[in-house]
Image (cartoon, rainbow, N blue to C red):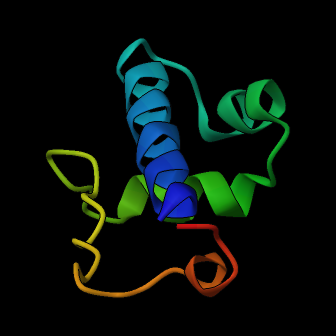
């Protein structure tokens, strides 16, 4: 899930740079990414909010619990 959050932040950063008038090439140089990647992110409709991690199942025992002292 961390990778998706990073992508979301990159998309926001790209859009902010684009709004200031930066070209795709300039954004690519600043971020160190290929211009095609920047273009792909800018063309993709980004999420309005960062992705949320799915809830973990509760009732699951930890592997270490069988070795832990009681």
**Outermost residue, top direction?**
20
| Residue 12 shown left or right of residue 56 in the figure | right
Residue 37, horizontal then vertical, whole percent: 67, 61
Nearest to the observer: residue 1 or residue 21: 1
Q: Residue furthest front?
A: 70
Query: Which residue shows up at 46% across the image and 17% down it?
Result: 21
Instruction: Identify which residue is drawn at 28% across, 57% down.
Output: 51
| Vertical arrangement, residue 61 with respect to residue 10, above or below | below
Q: Compared to 1, does 25 lie above or below?
A: above
**Quarter of the image holding residue 3?**
bottom right
* Image x and y of residue 49, in percent: 17, 45
Residue furthest toward the left? 48
Q: Nearer the viewer, residue 66 or 10?
A: 66
Q: Residue at x 24, y 58 (%)?
A: 52
Q: Locate residue 41 relative to residue 54 in the image: left or right.
A: right
Viewed as shown, does residue 58 lie left or right of 66?
Answer: left
Q: Residue 5, how many percent across, how many down?
A: 44, 51
Q: Is residue 33 above or below residue 59?
A: above
Horizontal relation, residue 27 to residue 16: left or right: right
Q: Residue at x 21, y 55 (%)?
A: 47
The number of callouts visible is 0
């Amino acid at each position: 899930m961390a990778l998706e959050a990073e992508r979301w932040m990159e998309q926001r950063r790209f859009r902010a740079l684009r709004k200031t008038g930066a070209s795709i090439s300039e954004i690519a140089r600043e971020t160190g990414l290929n211009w095609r990647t920047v273009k792909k992110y800018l063309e993709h409709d980004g999420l309005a909010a960062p992705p949320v991690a799915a809830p973990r199942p509760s009732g699951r025992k930890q592997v270490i619990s069988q070795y832990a002292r009681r």
